[in-house]
Image: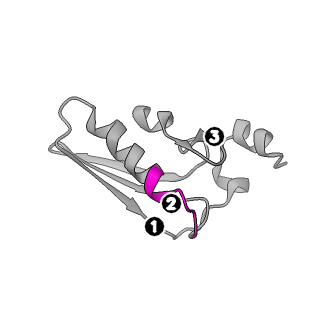
Amino acid sequence: MGKLWEVNDPEINLSIVDLGLVYGVEVEEGMVTVTMTLTSPGCPLGPVIRGEAYAKLKQLPGVKDVDVNIVWSPPWDPRTMASEDVKMSLGIW
């Protein structure tokens, strides 16, 4: 998930990995499949985040293609999914 740490949610300016938005990454024969969510179903910058995740992973050697799947289950909950640093940044105790 190294490259995904470089992808920030533009509204919050925090890494999608630290926010807990990335649920999984699978690699098989050069195909990378990312399963992730967004902070809300109506997130207006969803296409930007998805595109940046695709672009970052496509740069990696040996990656032939990337599929970024956006899912809504389980729903994102920063209280349980975000890193401790992000919780502090967002004021979640």
Residue 69 vertical position relative to residue 81 in the rendered view, above or below: below
Q: Quarter holding the N terminus?
A: top left
| The magenta segment | 42-48
* Distance Cα–Cα, label 1 vs label 2: 5 Å
**Marks 1 and 3 close (CB-CB < 8 Å):** no
Q: Image quarter for residue 56?
A: top left
Q: Secondary structure at mark 2?
A: loop
Q: Few, some or many C-alpha atoms within 10 Å of disc 2 (few <14, some 14-19, many ≥20)?
A: many
For the residue pair 14 and 47, the one nearer the viewer reads as: 47
| Residue depicted at 77% across the width and 39% down the height | 89
What's under tag 1, amino acid-wise? Val
Residues at discs 1 and 2 in contact (Cβ within 8 Å): yes
Residue 46 counted in the magenta span: yes
Disc 2 marks which amino acid?
A: Thr
Q: Where does residue 72 sit, x and y in percent of width and height? A: 51, 70
On residue 37, which mark appears?
Answer: 2
Badge 3 is on which residue?
13
